[in-house]
Amino acid sequence: MSQDYIYAVARVRAREVSLLTKNDMERLMATLSEEECLRILRDKGWGRGDSSLTAGEILAAEEAKTWEFLGELTQDAAPFGPLQVPTDGNNLKAAIKCPALGLEPRDVFLPGGRWDAQELFSMAKERDFSSLSPILSQGAEKALSALLQTSDGQLCDAIVDRACLEEILHLGKESGLAVLENYGQWITATADIQTAYRCCKAGKNREFLELALAPCDGLDIGELIAAALQGGEELLNYLDATPYREGAEKLRVSASAFEKWRDDRAIELIKGEKAEYESAGPLFAYAVARRREIDTARIILSGKRNGLAEEKLRERLRETYV
């Protein structure tokens, strides 16, 4: 691989030592208030050196700093595409719904996607998504058509979500990096399971499931749909006979237990990049690790703010990269 990646990975290794550890998480958990948590995070260098920043502003600053740092290391944004797709999906859903419902988009777009949110809004108004990637373009056209024909916002969202999963799979395979491909397969399979379970609980029909679930290597979508149509317990029994048996066990506990399991296993998938020095894999792993610790900090801060019991808060904590 190029000398550029060797240098970039070396810089990532130097930054990894500042990632929050389990001990850091315990310190945050031991605090009595949100302000105490923020003080610890500021002492760790979080934020922009401005003590007046709110929790949301500090978290947003950390997200921005992550992308600024990665932008210094490489001009090739392709390895980070799978992490940006969910933001594109959120913005695309809002862009499609606003003009269809005659609304102006206010506070509905998120920063950090591959496409500018206002450009997505213009595409939706003009009903021309050809500037997007082929997968997202087809998904957006289908979602808009479904919304206009049925006025079903959930169906619109489901179609866009499926297109995003297919995009993540495509980007992973196209990258030539095993970590991106494995990550994409894991995210897609577990998202399909979660969607199937929710659809089962909501009584969605076969047509909805077929539109919402993205084919992937880890699951037989036909069998998943058939099981979901039979009921929640039948779906979990089906999963018991797949590599996702542990996920079924977590769903029997709660949806949040499943989400924690999914996220923790995703972190395990990327830890192998700690031994890699000659590809973009470690840069991708660092981006995932940073996003995960920011999300975990958000969970703790929210719990402290709302007086959530420690036991309940610990149930939501994710594993750290370091």
Image: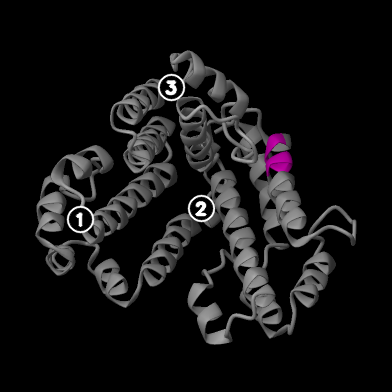
Query: Residue at horizontal 18%, vertical 65%?
Result: 232
Residue 177's image quarter?
Answer: top left
Of circles 2 and 1, the one toward us is 1
Q: How crowded is the residue under tag 2: few (<14 C-alpha within 10 Å), some, or many (20+)?
A: some
Question: Which residue type does callout 3 highlight?
Answer: Ser
What is the C-alpha distance between the residues marked 2 and 3? Answer: 28 Å
Q: In the rendered view, would you say 246 is above or below 228?
A: below
Query: Residue at horizontal 55%, vertical 52%?
Result: 288
Where are the magenta residues, as a range?
67-71
Question: Which residue type does callout 2 highlight?
Answer: Glu
In the picture of the structure, the residue carrying the numbered disc 3 is: 133
Residue 103's image quarter?
Answer: top right
- Residue 154 is situated, as x and y percent measured from the top left of the image, at 35, 43
Earlier-in-chain disc, 3 versus 1:
3
- Residue 287 is situated, as x and y percent measured from the top left of the image, at 59, 48
User: Would residue 207 be seen by someone viewing this image from the given angle?
Assistant: yes
In the picture of the structure, the residue carrying the numbered disc 1 is: 203
Of circles 2 and 3, the one toward us is 3
Residue nearest the viewer, comparing 86 with 169: 86
Q: Quadrant of the N terminus?
A: top right
Earlier-in-chain disc, 2 versus 1:
1
Residue 263 lies left or right of residue 39; in this view the side is: left
